[in-house]
Structures are given as C-alpha cells and as structure tokens.
Image (spheres, grey):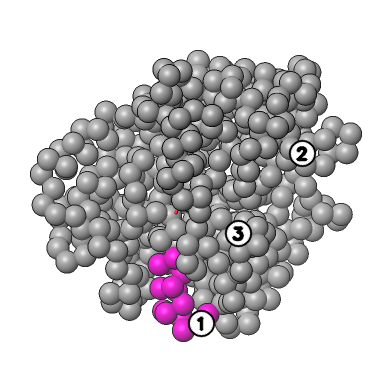
Amino acid sequence: MSTLYARDEAAVAGIEKLRFFPLEVVSGSGSTLVTPDGRELLDLSATWTASGLGHGHPAIVEAVSRAVRTAPGSGGLSAVHPDSVGLAEDLLALVPGTGERRVYLGHAGSDANDVALRACRHATGRRTVLAFEHSYHGGVGVAMGVSGVHVDAGVPADPDAVFIPYPNPFRPGADGLDADVAACLATAEQHLAGGSIACLIVEPILSDGGLVVPPDGFLARLHDLCRAHGVPMICDEVKMGLGRPGTLHAFEHDGVVPEIVTFGKVLGGGLPLSAAVGPAEILDHPPAAALLTTAGNPVCAAAGRAVLATIVGDQLADRAAEVGALLSNALRGLAGSPGADRIGDVRGRGLAIGVELVDPATGDRDPRLAAQVVYRAWELGAVVYYVGGNVLEITPPLVLTEAEAIRGAEILGAAIADAAAGRVDAEEVAKYAGW
Ligand SMILES: Cc1ncc(COP(=O)(O)O)c(C=O)c1O
C-alpha cells in the first residue's frame, strides 16, 4: 500500500468511504485520471457520474475561475447573486412543468431529495413516503431512510417509508415481467388510494440497486396513478439525468412530467451542487426549513450554469446516445471470448450501461466476481465500480470518445477473462470491502 493511501486510512473517517481498490488520483483531463506515479487510467465511472463532463472541462474551469476571483461571499441564504438566480432560471427553462415553480439549490443529491421529501410531507400533511426496494436517494436524513440500498445494508428505514418492488426485466418473477409490473402497480395504487401518502420517490433507472432499466411505460403508468390520487411524484434524476441516458432527462423516455425533479452529481461538474425543481406551493414552505449557509454559492452556481450550457450547447445527450450504443455493442461483442459466459446481461440507455456478472451454471448473481473484475480493471488501467452486488456500472464522462469507448470495452473484457480464470489476487481484493 502506498504512503498516500496509508495516510488516508490514518486520517480520513471510514464513515465516508466506499472503496473497491486503492485508487489514488492527483489530476485528470477529459476521461483520463492520473495517479501520483503518472499512470493514466480510463475513467468509466466519472466519479459515480459527478464528473459527468469529464475532468478539467474548459467551460467549468473558466466559469469557476471567474466566480472565485469575483465571488462576493458564499451563499444564497441571505443574499442574491446573478449566478444562483440564473441557475434556478436555467433549470426552470430546462425542466418541463406547469404552474408557478421554484428551485431549491443545495449541495448534494442527498439534501435535494431530503428537502423535497420533507416539503411534500409538509405540503400534504401526510407522512408516508412510497419508495422502491433497492433504491438510492441519499446518504443522510430522510433521503437515506427511504433508500432501499441502505435498508438492505442494515440502516433503519424511515418509520414512515413503504417499499415496493422495482420491476427487473432481467430477473422477472415466476409469472413473468408483465405480472411483476401489474403487481407493482397494484400495490402502488393500494397505497396511493389509502390517503396517507405524502409523495412517491422513484429513480427513472434504478442505479445503485443494479442499473435496472424498467420496462417501457412503467414510469408513465406509475405517474398516472400518482396523479389520479393527487400524490406528487419526485423523480430522482441525480445520477441518471442531464444527458447521460441519451435524452436531457431520463423521465423523457416515458413522456412523463413529474411534479418534482431532483438533480445532483453532474450538475456541479465535480463541485458540490444539487437542485430540486417543483411547485412553488410545495418548495416555498415552510419558510426557512432547509438552511445550508453556502447553498447557492456563486462558485458552484457558476459551475452549474456552465455544465447546463455545455450539455445543451454541445448536444451531449445525442452524443451519449451514439457513444453509448458503440460501447454497449462492443461489450455485447465480447460474447464468445474467454470469460464472456460470465456476462449475463448488458443493458442501459446511452452512457448508463450495466453489465451483470453471473455464475454461468446457475445464472445466479456473482458478487465475488464483480469485486475481482473492478479490481483487475483498475490494474489494467480503467476505473469502474459495481452496483447491486454484481453489476458493473459503466457511466463514463459524457465526453468519452469513440476510441476510448472501444478501449474501455477491451479492458473490461480482459478484466472479466482474468477474473473468471482466477488470475486476480482474492486476498488483495478482500481488503476493499466495497458496498
Ligand atoms: C439516484 C441517486 N440519488 C441521490 C444520490 C445521492 O447523491 P449524493 O451522494 O450526491 O448526496 C445518489 C448517489 O449515489 C443517487 O445515485
């Protein structure tokens, strides 16, 4: 273990770590990360999508440098600044919706969801939050308590959360996917009709739960039910939104217009920034109930405006669709090569791709293999993590080039082959607990 990694272990709190291999980085450019000893790694995660525009994007560098030089303080709490107001206006223009709407500006996906959930409880006077099993909405507060992934890991659920199953096309129940969808919607309707639901919160693509793309029309049918019972839907676009799925918003795929949409990760281009966009009657109340001193600060707001302008101006959603198709096809093209019988499924939209690793004999999930594959990929020169226990989550920067996509698929193919053949040091891998 290097000195830097050992210093981290001695100094930085374990409560905020999720480690898969001893990754050390000192700089980055585009889709490349650079280690202290000068090794270049292909970034197939984009910091769990937070570096979605790539590392050191000139538009962000320019915007942040200007803002830092001129920043008149650090927050929207008790003052207004053109960039924080401008960012809220940009979001209102980019997110579909009707009526009078507002934008909450925050620091992380966690607080955007937390605030949206609490505001819905306040506005409706109801407590229960309808959420999904294996979902992820945050690492603190109410957002954590309604996250199925945390509950799976033993964190106490929010006492007023109700979890329903998310249909998984690759692993349908005994009666098939249509029956799963029907059962899920029937359960949702039963709860929605009961009169105690404050809101429903949903990921348009279940991400940390295993990069599960729901069947077409699922989100629309769910939203129809919410509307029929007057329950606001919070669509959590924190990880999958803003260009990555090949559309600006992931919910566009189903043609829905959710009442509240939350953003984070790529919105700040690597800086802490999040947002919730929704009805004024929900997000305006109660006043002064979500106070973070540096929320809406000019530096992060400037980064957010540059990110949105770049995604739209450079047509990065279209690009994600094209390069994502190339990368998915290259991954599917691994079929027949050594170790490829361990690939149970390649799925996704745009540059959000999941590769499910299985035991070829049984089709069961193979989490041990997933841990070894991401470790081996790091040794071979790529950064990628897994979700849902056994699914490689491939979410590179939206600026990934075609050549990088092909190289990424080659590295992943080699990593899977090596791990399947037992060429990865299991003892070394075991030092990094992962999820
Ligand atoms: C869908 C989703 N929502 C919310 C969050 C929380 O975002 P943050 O970690 O920035 O607080 C995450 C983080 O992984 C996420 O994937």
- The percent coordinates of residue 343 (x first, y second) are 75, 30
Q: In terms of depth relative to the viewer, which is nearer, 310 or 396?
A: 396
Q: Residues within 10 Å of mark 1 (few under 14, many from 20)?
A: some
Q: Residues within 10 Å of mark 2 (few under 14, many from 20)?
A: some
- The percent coordinates of residue 330 (x first, y second) are 63, 21
Q: Quadrant of residue 25?
A: top left
Q: In terms of depth relative to the viewer, which is nearer, 289 or 246?
A: 289
Question: Which disc, if any, is residue 287?
Answer: none
**Res. 137 visible in picture:** yes
Residue 107 included in the magenta stretch of the image: no
| First in residue order: circle 1 vs circle 2 | 1
**Cα distance in 3D space between marks 3 and 1:** 23 Å
Whether pointer 1 and pointer 2 mark residues with C-beta atoms closer than 8 Å, the reply is no
Question: Which disc, if any, is residue 150?
Answer: 3
The answer to whether the residue bearing label 3 lies less than 8 angstroms from the nearest atom of ligand 1 is: no
Is 133 rendered above or below residue 37?
below
Q: Nearer the observer, disc 1 or disc 2?
A: 2
Question: Which disc, if any, is residue 126?
Answer: 1
Q: How many marks?
A: 3
Please state which amino acid type lies under the numbered disc 3. His
Q: Secondary structure at mark 2?
A: loop
Residue at horizontal 38%, vertical 64%? 278
Q: Which residue is mark 2?
A: 366
- The percent coordinates of residue 107 (x first, y second) are 35, 55
Q: Quadrant of residue 115?
A: bottom left
Left or right: 326 with respect to 97? Answer: right
